[in-house]
Image: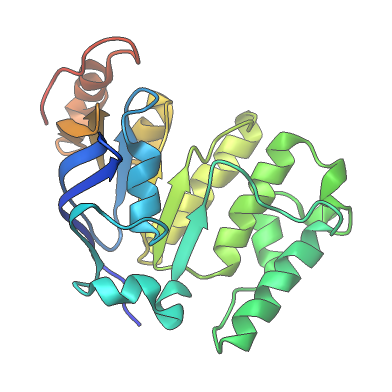
Amino acid sequence: MDLLPLRFEDVGRAYGRTWALRGIDLEVRRGTVVGLWGPNGAGKTTMLRIAAGLEVPSHGCCTWAGDPRRLVDPRARGGLGWMAHGTHLYPWLSAEENLALLVRLRRSLGLASADPRAALERVGLEKRATEPVRTFSRGMAQRLSFARVLVGRPQLVLLDEPMTALDASGRRLVTAAIHGLVEEGAAVLLSSHDPEVHASLADRVVCLEQGRVRARVDRAPEASFAARLSDALGTAEAPVRGLG
């Protein structure tokens, strides 16, 4: 079942009298990466949770392939790859057992999965496959969490700070794996505080401030992307400037 494109149409999300998001319009198409940047409280995680169907907009609409019902359809949700800020792994299971459990759950719903061994290789954990996750460093657990995304063979990938705790080698592996998903036709929406993550991955960066879109910076033309991105992002404390 098709999930793409992911589309936000005039989306707002309120918690009591406080609006975490207002007037969000965004489309994420097949084979593209859209980055979300902004200071803490800007609305990045709320957008990801709405895109994952874990929260419902207070205003407007979020859809997969033009149909809001697909966000709650188990068959459609099988094509979602969701990586939260926490790893949500089972610490007493090994790396391969964590992935095997996912495969069994997907099989019970009639959903196909990628080879868990290949997923572990893509994140550099094949030699630690039989070790319990409780012995892993935070960075290793982060890579395993991303391997779980790969096993789901996702069409739509939602990543909340995917480079958390990763060293240079881990960042290279996860970056390459994200590029691989895009080459296979997936759409990626990711949140990161790190401008280097956006510069290495994103086709477009959406800058959020106080729940509103303040700037959009497109990669094209490539030659000026880094400079325009740097100008738009500024720092977490500074006002967002620049328009793409």
State the image coordinates of residue 96 (x, y, percent, origin top left): 79, 64
Q: Residue at x 64, y 52 (%)?
A: 145
Q: Is residue 132 left or right of residue 177?
A: right
Q: Is residue 23 left or right of residue 208?
A: left
As drawn, the residue found furthest toward the top would be 238
Q: Nearer the viewer, residue 72 or 176?
A: 72
Residue 243 higher or lower than 218, as above or below: above
Q: Nearer the viewer, residue 87 or 59?
A: 59
Count of labels in the image: 0
Instruction: Please identify the quadrant where the C terminus is shown.
Output: top left
Q: Residue at x 40, y 41 (%)?
A: 45
**Residue 70 quadrant:** bottom left
State the image coordinates of residue 53 (x, y, percent, origin top left): 38, 62
State the image coordinates of residue 219 (x, y, percent, origin top left): 21, 37
Residue 35 higher or lower than 229, as above or below: below
Q: Residue at x 34, y 56 (%)?
A: 51
Residue 17 visible? The answer is yes
Q: Is residue 237 left or right of residue 126?
A: left
Q: Nearer the viewer, residue 60 or 152?
A: 60
Residue 100 higher or lower than 138, as above or below: below
State the image coordinates of residue 86 (x, y, percent, origin top left): 61, 43
Q: Residue at x 44, y 60 (%)?
A: 181
**Residue 72 quadrant:** bottom left
